Image (cartoon, rainbow, N blue to C red):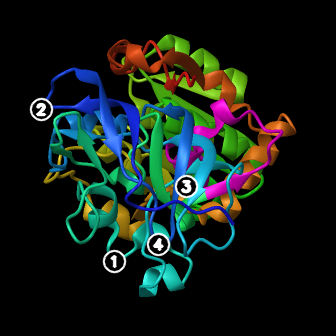
């Protein structure tokens, strides 16, 4: 198997978040080669996720300047000496980092890895080392979600580089590594939405609409999408929603109770707005369950009526990365897409990486559900 020295670096093009709330800057940088179980990936395209933007804006304390990006898809170019199952030429989707050895990881719950925050948000490896530096030799924070894919090449580990079929559309697949798998996995893996049940998605962004599609795959027969953007609600109908609610018009909880005859069996909250979560909990029927995936600033609190929760047997649970085992779940989503049962391509719009700030603004304004940034390679 081809290997490359960790001391062998290469020049890359990277989009760098330099300061809180500042625009991304496109610049040249130097990336070292892979070591141990790392793989060097030529990034074909990478999704732009809400998490990238809230980190740029410092909702989470990731050190800046940094190369962010965590929905990369590309081609393996080189591997470290400890890599066993990947080789140059493989097509991969990059996903979140997990140690693979702690108790949650050993139990198949890598999204709850005991070292999750350090591996994904630490701005360096667990020893504090970075792999990328600017043209002046100054280190840039990286290892974002164990990949930092806002660059023409990225270093990942073998356990978060998921091999996919070469006949799948690689430039489309990056968002499966985070946002799409979060929404779909929350429905299929976490909430375990059942055939004939009712489901409500609070938020019809990329995550919420992925949940809508997954609810249809799971066999839910009442699927409700709630948002304030009419175009998103129209798309939700196309993707499987049986009902849509503009939350600016009337009482959402009462509308859901009227549709379902008392409340939904399952719900997902993806907006990160505390007041929306409070209402979503009240929309649940007896023994209803809600998953929480929206990420507000650290320290944000929400309110709910304890007796309403208690007497109705309701369940609230946080969900990271859709509780997915990416090596299994991402290929499953690819196959569902290929069968026409999970058309997540209807969520995306492509941008050259040089237009990352335009893509970020379009995402913020709701013009684009899921931006995907393309890289041009000579």
Magenta highlight range: 162-185
Q: Nearer the viewer, mark 1 or mark 3?
A: 1
Give residue 187's position: percent from left, percent from top: 60, 53
**Structural distance between the alpha carbons of marks 2 and 4:** 33 Å
* Image quadrant containing the C terminus: top right
Q: Which mark is residue 114?
A: 1
Which label's residue is closer to the chain start, 2 or 1?
A: 2
Secondary structure under badge 2? loop
Which label's residue is closer to the chain start, 3 or 4?
A: 4
**Structural distance between the alpha carbons of marks 3 and 4:** 33 Å
Classify 10 Å Cα crowding around label 4: few (below 14), some (14-19), many (20 and above).
some
Choose between 194 and 265: the one closer to the eye: 194
Q: Quadrant of residue 33?
A: bottom left
Which label's residue is closer to the chain start, 3 or 2?
A: 2
Q: Main secondary structure of the magenta part?
A: helix
Choose between 53 and 187: the one closer to the eye: 53
**Structural distance between the alpha carbons of marks 2 and 1:** 28 Å
* Residue occupied by mark 3: 186
Marks 2 and 4 close (CB-CB < 8 Å) = no
Marks 3 and 4 close (CB-CB < 8 Å) = no
**Structural distance between the alpha carbons of marks 3 and 2:** 30 Å
Secondary structure under badge 4? loop
Give residue 140's position: percent from left, percent from top: 21, 44
Which label's residue is closer to the chain start, 2 or 4?
A: 2
Q: Nearer the viewer, mark 2 or mark 4?
A: 4
Which label's residue is closer to the chain start, 1 or 3?
A: 1
Secondary structure under badge 1? loop
* Residue occupied by mark 4: 36
Give residue 1's position: percent from left, percent from top: 69, 66
Marks 1 and 4 close (CB-CB < 8 Å) = no
Magenta span includes 203: no
């Amino acid at each position: 198997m081809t290997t490359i020295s960790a001391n062998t670096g290469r020049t890359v093009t990277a989009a760098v978040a330099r300061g809180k709330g500042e625009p991304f800057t496109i610049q040249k940088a130097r990336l070292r080669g892979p070591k141990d179980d790392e793989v060097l990936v030529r990034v074909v395209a990478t999704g732009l996720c809400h998490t990238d933007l809230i980190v740029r804006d410092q909702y989470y304390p990731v050190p800046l300047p940094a190369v962010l990006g965590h929905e990369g898809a590309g081609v393996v170019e080189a591997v470290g000496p400890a890599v066993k199952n990947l080789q140059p030429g493989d097509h991969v989707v990059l996903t979140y980092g997990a140690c693979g050895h702690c108790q949650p990881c050993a139990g198949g719950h890598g999204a709850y890895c005991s070292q999750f925050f350090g591996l994904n948000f630490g701005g360096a490896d667990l020893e504090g080392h970075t792999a990328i530096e600017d043209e002046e030799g100054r280190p840039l924070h990286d290892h974002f979600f164990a990949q930092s894919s806002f660059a023409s090449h990225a270093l990942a580990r073998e356990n978060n580089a998921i091999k996919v079929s070469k006949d799948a559309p690689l430039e489309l697949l990056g968002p499966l590594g985070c946002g799409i798998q979060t929404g779909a996995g929350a429905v299929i893996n976490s909430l375990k939405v059942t055939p004939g049940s009712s489901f409500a998605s609070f938020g019809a962004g990329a995550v919420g609409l992925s949940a809508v599609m997954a609810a249809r795959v799971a066999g839910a027969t009442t699927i409700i999408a709630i948002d304030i953007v009419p175009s998103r609600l129209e798309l939700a109908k196309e993707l499987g929603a049986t009902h849509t609610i503009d939350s600016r018009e009337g009482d959402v909880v009462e509308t859901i109770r009227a549709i379902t005859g008392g409340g939904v069996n399952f719900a997902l909250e993806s907006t990160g707005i505390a007041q929306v979560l409070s209402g979503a909990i009240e929309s649940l029927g007896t023994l209803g369950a809600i998953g929480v995936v929206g990420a507000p600033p650290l320290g944000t609190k929400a309110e709910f009526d304890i007796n309403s929760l208690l007497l109705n047997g309701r369940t609230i649970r946080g969900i990271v990365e859709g509780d997915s085992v990416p090596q299994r779940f991402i290929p499953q989503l690819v196959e569902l897409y290929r069968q026409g049962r999970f058309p997540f391509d209807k969520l995306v719009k492509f941008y050259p990486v040089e237009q990352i700030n335009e893509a970020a603004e379009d995402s913020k304004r709701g013009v684009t559900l899921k931006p995907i940034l393309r890289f041009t390679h000579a």
